[in-house]
Image: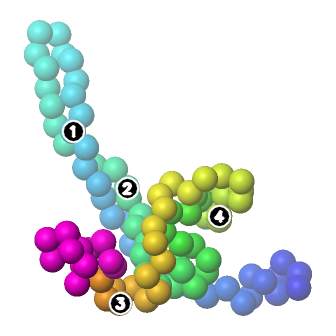
Amino acid sequence: MNKKENLQKRKTKKIRVLYSTRVKTENGGSMRRSYYAQYPRISMEGEWLEKLGFHIGDRLKVEYGDGSINICLAETGMQPAMLCEDTGEYGAGESKNSARKSSGGKEA
């Protein structure tokens, strides 16, 4: 399959650029001034990411420039940022650890 055919098979999803705030501090002579600055933020979530091969804890490579962003999985030799147990479906039942905690340390 060539690049043009691959681009035609792609699906689209519309999302919005939101904002995030951070405290900024400036030293202006004898006065110190703090304020909240807004920065653009993009958030993506959903089962569609997993269907594309993106799993919790995966490391990503983000390439950007000329008004576009490309996100792909990083090299396979990298360690995941976070490891999670596979519970099958999202929110399907409790894990053994959470059942132990809720029953005072004994398995339910």
Q: Amino acid at mark 2?
A: Pro
Mark 2 secondary-structure assignment: strand
Location of mark 1 (residue): 23
Location of mark 3 (residue): 92
Specify which label sits upstream in the sequence, 4 or 3.
Answer: 4
Give the quadrant of residue 11.
Answer: bottom right
Taking 6 as reference, is 32 above or below it?
above
Q: Indicate left or right for 44 with 60 as reference.
A: left
Task: Tell me residue 99's x, y (percent).
Answer: 24, 78
Q: Amino acid at mark 1?
A: Val
Mark 3 secondary-structure assignment: loop
Q: Amino acid at mark 3?
A: Ala
Task: Tell me residue 106's x, y (percent).
Answer: 21, 74
Q: Nearer the viewer, mark 4 or mark 3?
A: 3
Disc 4 to disc 3, C-alpha distance: 26 Å
Category of crowding for the residue at label 2, using alpha-carbon neighbours closer than 10 angstroms: few (below 14), some (14–19), many (at least 20)? few
Specify which label sits upstream in the sequence, 4 or 1.
Answer: 1
Location of mark 4 (residue): 73
